[in-house]
Amino acid sequence: MTETRRLYYEDVYKKEFTATVVECREQKKGYAVIVDESAFYPEGGGQPSDVGTLGNAKVTEVHEKDGELLHYTDKALEVGAKVEGKIDWARRFDLMQQHSGEHIVSGLVHEAYGYDNVGFHMSSDVITVDLSGVLSEAQLAEIEAETNRKIWENSEVEITYPSRDELDKLDYRSKKELTGQVRLVRFPGSDLCACCGTHVTHTGEIGAVKILTVENFHEGIRLTMICGKSCLLY
């Protein structure tokens, strides 16, 4: 297994980097490239992967499989070569805004009503969130208003890797039982959640949140929402 240094966890704003090609595996469609370090975030935790370029190759998807970070490209890259990596920053920042806004909404719902986020999906247009209980339009309007108040406080987002003993004493959101090192993301006064995704470092960067639609779904509700630049365009 080839281990790649994850630059997106060291500096979430890193848009460009230089790396060495470690492996290049031919696939049915294109190639799977492994480099020694990368700022490309792989699909996971409800968040789509980054896209961009490695050298003269287009990176169309990034996945983590068996601990390896695989960059799927349209061209082969020479093993041992130094390549410039560039992520599509406008797309990544939009995903960071969307993901961060969803945390605050889900955290405030959990705090006020005890409901869990049981499903989460980010598309190119909207975020879909499934909640385990029913909320009225008036309650959702208050959640939306409180979310925007938290955003405009511009609090610093905290990321920690607590020990197992520390973790046992914390009340945090998680969709599944976790083993190994847990990464916690805290939005002060709003949410504490185990999450592997990329987020803004200050809540003000989310800009704003708008809840668009709500419908009954299983025992709870499914809502769609947008954040940041998407609110302006809407």
Image: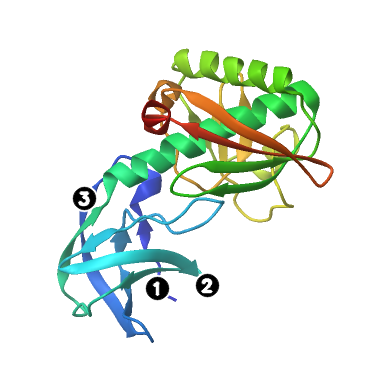
- Cα separation between marks 2 and 3: 25 Å
Q: Position of residue 134 (x, y in %)?
A: 80, 32
Q: Nearer the viewer, residue 26 or 193?
A: 26
Q: Is residue 140 above or below residue 180?
A: above
Residue matched to label 1: 2
Residue at the spot 57% in from the left edge and 31% down from the top edge: 212
Question: If the image is split into quadrants, where does the N terminus sit?
Answer: bottom left
Q: Position of residue 213 (x, y in %)?
A: 62, 34
Residue at the spot 40% in from the left edge and 46% down from the top edge: 9
Query: Is residue 12 visible to the viewer in this orientation of the structure?
Result: no
Q: Secondary structure at mark 1?
A: loop
Q: Nearer the viewer, residue 205 or 65?
A: 205
Q: Is residue 19 above or below residue 98?
A: below
Query: Is residue 226 visible to the viewer in this orientation of the structure?
Result: yes
Q: Are marks 2 and 1 in contact (CB under 8 Å)?
A: no
- Cα separation between marks 3 and 1: 21 Å
Q: Position of residue 187 (x, y in %)?
A: 55, 26
Q: Secondary structure at mark 3?
A: strand
Q: Residues within 10 Å of mark 3 (few under 14, many from 20)?
A: some
Residue matched to label 2: 66
Q: Secondary structure at mark 2?
A: loop
Q: Is residue 31 left or right of residue 226?
A: left
Earlier sequence position, callout 2 versus callout 3? 3
Q: Which mark is residue 16?
A: 3
Which kind of residue does numbered mark 1 sit on?
A: Thr
Q: Position of residue 47 (x, y in %)?
A: 50, 50
- Cα separation between marks 2 and 1: 10 Å
Q: Are marks 2 and 3 in contact (CB under 8 Å)?
A: no
Which kind of residue does numbered mark 2 sit on?
A: Asp
Residue at the spot 67% in from the left edge and 24% down from the top edge: 108
Earlier sequence position, callout 3 versus callout 1? 1
